[in-house]
Amino acid sequence: MNTHVKPATTDRPVVSPAEWQARVDLAAVYRLVAHYGWGDVIYNHSSLRVPGEERKFLIKRHELLYEEVTPANLVKVSMDDDLNESAGVNRPGFTLHGGVLSARPDVNCAVHVHTEIGMAISGLKHGLRMVAQPAVRFYNRVGYHDYEGITEDFGERERINKALGNNRALIMRNHGLLTVGRSAREAFVLMKSLIEAARIQLKMEATGSALIEIPAEICEKTARQYGHHDSGRGAADWPAYLRMLDAIDANWRG
């Protein structure tokens, strides 16, 4: 049973059908992050570009738990602004997501988490290893950014974006994980795979046994297969995730 205390109901904003669908998708990402235990009370963020308003994006209100996010109470902000909590959004979240979405017009959604598994893999000098299928999604498609403290200085954006490059993910050293995608579904599923890859690798390494590394040519082949999968049949799983959320809390779309 869902027993959290919900905030006061926010009236549904008057927006285009495309924006409302974007709000539903991003609210679903927040709820799924909570469901899988990746949240950190009110901290960490996911964002989604507003359809038809390329310089604006949606993000959760600073004070809300992930379980309290709905399509209606998401905040729409301009990535050209300089915002903090006085505007209702978390400053580090605005800094990171506004910078990434501004630099990557091919990206519409970004997911950032601080899970223990993510921080553990981010503190390993050798980084992510190609020792399990979930990791292969990121073969030559993951960047690394050195830790600079809490991400609230716009000056760090350039270095984050350089480290991310054209990749699907960024491992932020000693900090956490970031995935990006053309859709909410893609960014979320990539995060799910990245966390799975990190967990599997850490379990394998903990045995102290020699690991079987997947050959480079197989990694590249499989990474390309996943690219086709995500742009094709993979999209069929998103409605299934939404049905799962409906079963958990029938009011999440409110």
Image (tube, helix red, strand yellow):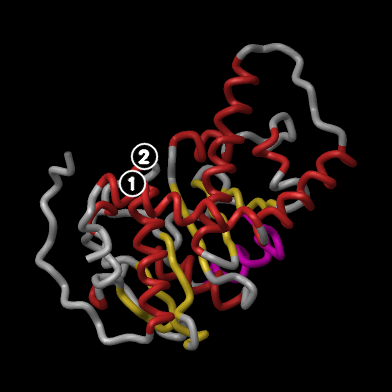
What residue is shown at x 25% (from left), y 58% (from top)? 252
Q: Secondary structure at mark 1?
A: helix
Q: Which residue is mark 2?
A: 37
Query: What secondary structure is the magenta-colored segment mainly?
Result: helix
Q: Between residues 128 and 11, which one lies in front from this camera angle?
A: 11
Read off the magenta span: 155-169
Q: Is residue 242 left or right of residue 102?
A: left
Residue lying furthest right: 217
Q: Between residues 233 and 143, which one lies in front from this camera angle?
A: 233
Quarter of the image with the C terminus is bottom left
Q: Secondary structure at mark 2?
A: loop
Q: Quadrant of residue 104?
A: bottom right
Quarter of the image with the N terminus is top left
Q: Which residue is mark 1?
A: 34
Q: Between residues 108 and 55, which one lies in front from this camera angle?
A: 108
Q: Is residue 63 in view?
A: yes
Residue 78, given in percent of the width and then of the height, sits at 41, 84
Q: Between residues 120 and 156, which one lies in front from this camera angle?
A: 120
Q: Quadrant of residue 236?
A: bottom right
Residue 52, given in percent of the width and then of the height, sits at 49, 87
Instruction: Give the amino acid at mark 1.
Output: Ala
What residue is shown at x 41% (from left), y 64% (from top)? 25
Question: Any magenta on residue 161?
Answer: yes
What residue is shown at x 43% (from left), y 80% (from top)? 18
The total number of labels drawn is 2
